[in-house]
Amino acid sequence: GGYIADSRIDGTVGPYSQQQWYTRDSSVGGWTNAVWNMTFSGVEGAPAQSFPNPPYTTLTTTPVSREKPFLYLDGADYKVFLPELRTNARGTTWGSGTPRGTSLPLTQFYVAKPGVSAATLNEALTQGLNLLFTPGIYHLDQTVRVERANAVVLGLGYATLVPDNGVTAMRVADVDGVRLAGFLIDAGTVNSATLLEIGPQGTTTDHSANPTTVQDVFIRIGGAGPGKATTSMVVNNRHTIIDHTWVWRADHGDGVGWETNRADYGVVVNGADVLATGLFVEHFNKYDVQWNGERGRTIFFQNEKAYDAPNQAAIQNGATRGYAAYKVADTVTTHEGWGLGSYCYYNVDPTIRQAHGFAAPAVPGVKFHGLLVVSLSGNGQYDHVINAIGAATSGTTTVPSTVVSFP
């Protein structure tokens, strides 16, 4: 499955065999079908809410969104366009002509090429420049520190950042309006405690008027060779928007094994008022998503549990069978999610049982809409969908077990 945003499709969209899909702030002429989880927010022409039959989860608007920066040519001059923040967004940004926002000349960017040192990147940021990564692989022997409000870090061709010697690849300060977009962080061979940190621990600064956005930022542990990281992404800054991120502990390729590419946690959210739109997090050894902050919201979540767990004991979480794909901390009083799915394919030990895909406190302010779990061909099974609610999966038919609303 995948993702569409800020797009107009005059014809009918046919996802056909795509298991899940998220469409945001767009316009479609029609939509032919759904398999397990098709989620829409702010989409003109979207099918009506009907989860689970068919499994359409539809929100009229997206609460907050800001499209990612992009490079363009203005006459003979390259510039980077910065779309403005929208609230209760619906439809494309450009439906009435030129989208609203500002442009920066390329002279305000340090254009990075593979081989540049992390020290040079940090010096450019300190001088007030933004970063534009051209395609290639960048080895970092120190953390890239994004400490200036409204700084832009934009990658072309999924420029790949590899932290060496266990450093954190990138760290954003407690400032307004940082935009991260279009790059991949690939874990190094020495374990990193974290790969991407958005804000310092414990911050409570209000960033609602100008949040940090993390868009088309992918994180990979293993796959191109052994890599390790305890936690991939930590979000501490309030009001951060995580939009279309794929945080992936590799299930195939080079350097793949339960301990070879050990990665316990995918995304940990400590900040309050964080919004995720299009969150793809897969195959982590423990919690794929651990949400500790208040008033968090997720619109569309896709997950597969780690294929390669050697046995039941390897995933045991105290008295609980397995770690939830999406865990809301017991202390949280307000949280909401729409269109969330978790799948298991325990192909090393198909007898593994997973207690649930989702775990959250059973309090009035914690709400979910359109939840599902699926056992792929009977390789492992779920006992429930969320907490002890929802039917168990069974057999080899790959039929979802669903919960329409929680609590």
Image (cartoon, rainbow, N blue to C red):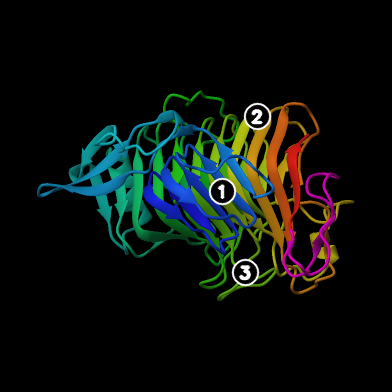
Q: Which mark is residue 279?
A: 1
**In the displayed structure image, the side of residue 150 where residue 15 appears, left or right:** right
**In the displayed structure image, the side of residue 255 where residue 218 appears, left or right:** left
**Residue that sits furthest to the right in the current view:** 319
| Mark 2 to mark 1 CA distance (whole Å) | 18 Å
Q: Which residues are magenta?
A: 375-399
Q: Which mark is residue 251?
A: 3
**In the displayed structure image, the side of residue 67 where residue 167 appears, left or right:** right
Residue 298, given in percent of the width and then of the height, sits at 60, 40
Decide: few, some or many residues near mark 1? Use Cα within 10 Å; few <14, some 14-19, many ≥20: many
- Quadrant in the rendering for residue 321: bottom right
- Does the rendering let one see residue 169? no
Please report whichever mark, 3 or 2, sits nearer to the chain's N-terminal start: 3
Please report whichever mark, 1 or 3, sits nearer to the chain's N-terminal start: 3
- Does the rendering let one see residue 57? yes
Decide: is 277 above or below 222: above
| Dot 2 amino acid type | Glu
Residue 384, given in percent of the width and then of the height, sits at 83, 51
| Mark 1 to mark 3 CA distance (whole Å) | 18 Å
Please report whichever mark, 2 or 1, sits nearer to the chain's N-terminal start: 1
| Dot 3 amino acid type | Asp
Residue 86, given in percent of the width and then of the height, sits at 41, 30
